[in-house]
Image: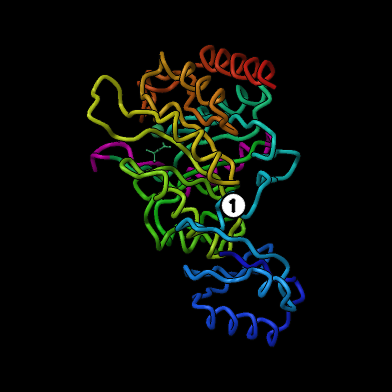
Amino acid sequence: MIIQLDPGATSAQKEKIQEVLTSIGYKPTAVQTQRASYLVCIGKNEFDIRRLGTLPGVADVHRVSESYKLVSRKWKVGESGIDLGDGVMIGAGSFSLMAGPCSIESEEQVRSVAKHLASQNIFIMRGGVFKPRSSPYAFRGMGMEGLKMFSSICREYKIKIITEVMQVSQIAPMYEYVDVFQVGARNSQNFNLLDELGRVDKPVLIKRGMSGTIDELLQSAEYVFSAGNERLMLCERGIRSYETAYRNTFDINAIAILKEKSHLPVIADPSHGIGLREHVPAIALAAAAAGADGVIYEVHEKPEEALSDAQQTLNYEESEQLIRNVRRLRESIG
Ligand code: PEP
Ligand code: MN
């Protein structure tokens, strides 16, 4: 159950509400986000909901039986949107394309991709500077120097940045250069990281873990929300299955189910989802048709020379085709 409190609820009123909750067998946790105050209550007993609804200080009461609460659609019927400023919106009806290289590699590379995106009216660029790599000898990213360069070039083009944060100690130095923090698949259940991102007033995109269930992804989002940050989005990027013909098994079902279960924007990552350049545009279309609020994909001026994920990265021509087709599909399905 979620109790939304009146913005002006007094401490005495809150205490009284908590007392009533305990008396009916519920365990309340107070949640203060950047937008509102809630009591998230765990319990199973039957009771007359009017008993709570009429208490002073209570704005709204919602029964939510799922293990995740605040990210559930059961209490928030509409769609949550994220305003990145300068007219760049994610979710709540708008469809977002976000693209960029797997890794930030050089000034020339960033400038070239930024120009490509701006020419296509795309104003969110992805690119990792801290790269989780299976091999310690692979390119692991340019780090903070790369992020500063990435940020200064993107600001010239009025492009917002989404980039992966791998650990808690990186949040503070990265903060001023980042518009959206990405939590990677390998960190999807790093609860310390999620908790800390809940205390940050910047949006967060959480990727589904490689073997994560939909419920686990929603619980990860619940961590960030309940720690204070409501500006969240969920990302399906494929899961590991027995299939070896492609990199991951992109779970189209997850898009539809996440949209049904949560009010948060759902973003599809077809690049990591299939891992094969030639099929990325088709999977992007499938995700858009399944109801995704956006697509994030990898693009590079010379994909074959990319320092990471070359095999799944599109060139500009392929990228333009993806953009054209996805926009056309969105128009045709309204
Ligand atoms: C990435 O976005 O480049 C990345 C490493 O993604 P994931 O965490 O989904 O593997
Ligand atoms: Mn990648």
Q: Which residue does the image show at 40% across and 17% down from the upper left?
A: 277
Asked whether 195 or 51 is in front, the reply is 51
Image side of residue 15 versus residue 218, left or right? right
Question: Which quadrant holds the C terminus?
Answer: top right
Q: Quadrant of residue 272?
A: top left
Left or right position of 217 against 28: left
Q: Quadrant of residue 279?
A: top left
**In the shown orientation, is residue 191 left or right of residue 109?**
left
Is residue 188 within the magenta segment?
A: no
Q: Residue at x 53, y 16 (%)?
A: 316
Q: Nearer the viewer, residue 323 or 290?
A: 290
SS class, disc 1: loop
Q: Work out whether residue 279 or residue 30 is closer to the camera in this orientation and state it.
A: 30
Residue bearing mark 1:
74
Q: What's the residue at 66%, 63% (across, down)? A: 34
- Compared with residue 291, is residue 259 higher up or lower down, i.e. above or below? below
The quarter of the rendering in which ligand 2 is drawn is top left
Do we see residue 177 in this rendering?
no
Name the quarter where the N terminus is drawn: bottom right
User: Mark 1 near ligand 1 (CB under 8 Å)?
Assistant: no
Residue segment shown in magenta: 134-158
Residue 136, image x and y in percent? 24, 43
Amino acid type assigned to the residue bearing label 1 in the image: Lys
> Which image quadrant is residue 59 in?
bottom right
Q: As displayed, is residue 271 above or below residue 84?
A: above
Instruction: Specify few, some or many for label 1: CA neighbours under 10 Å numbering under 14, 14-19, or 20 or more.
Output: some
Check if residue 142 falls in the magenta segment: yes
Q: Position of residue 196 (x, y in %)?
A: 48, 63
Q: Residue furthest bottom?
A: 12
Q: Position of residue 50 (x, y in %)?
A: 68, 70
